[in-house]
Image (spheres, grey):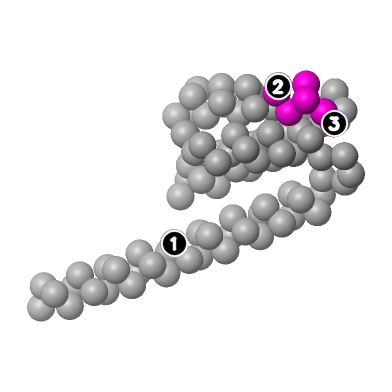
Amino acid sequence: MRTLFFAQLAAVLIGILMLKLIGPGHIAALIAMACIIIFMLVFNMMHPPAVSTALSVGFVTGSVLPLFLIALILLVLLIIVQKMMLDFLDGKQKKRII
């Protein structure tokens, strides 16, 4: 869960940084993609979908805030669903033991 959260957050922030520094386009997307891969390798947080997040933010031509908020909301929802499923599966496993 830590990997998912921090890799996606870093991908969005790196994508926004490249977008602001270079402008929208292939170069910004390429550099954002390379940077997030290096970030994930250095911090041992491999989450491949984060690469596509950085790539897509680098191509954005409008405001990135709505995209960031949507990504953040989806991330929170995914974490909640994952936690619920883990609790559900853990409860089923305890019933088998008893």
For the residue marked with disc 3, what is the amino acid?
A: Pro
For the residue marked with disc 1, what is the amino acid?
A: Gln
Could you tell which of marks 3 and 2 lies nearer the N-terminus?
3
Q: Which residue is mark 3?
A: 24
Which quadrant would residue 74 be assigned to in this image?
bottom right
Q: Which residue is mark 2?
A: 31
For the residue marked with disc 2, what is the amino acid?
A: Ile
Tell me residue 88's x, y (percent).
33, 72
Tell me the CA gap for discs 1 and 3: 34 Å
Residue reaching furthest to the front: 26
Pair 1/3: label in front: 3
Residue pictured at 76% horizontal, 33% vertical:
58
Per the rendering, the mark at residue 91 is none
**Main secondary structure along the magenta-highlighted residues:** helix
Tell me the CA gap for discs 3 and 2: 11 Å
Q: Is residue 26 magenta?
A: yes
Q: Crowding at label 2, few (<14), some or many (≥20) Cα neighbours within 10 Å?
A: some
Residue pictured at 82% horizontal, 45% vertical:
64
Q: Crowding at label 3, few (<14), some or many (≥20) Cα neighbours within 10 Å?
A: many
Per the rendering, the mark at residue 82 is 1
The residue range painted magenta reads 24-30
Could you tell which of marks 1 and 3 lies nearer the N-terminus?
3
Residue pictured at 61% horizontal, 28% vertical:
36
Q: Is residue 40 magenta?
A: no
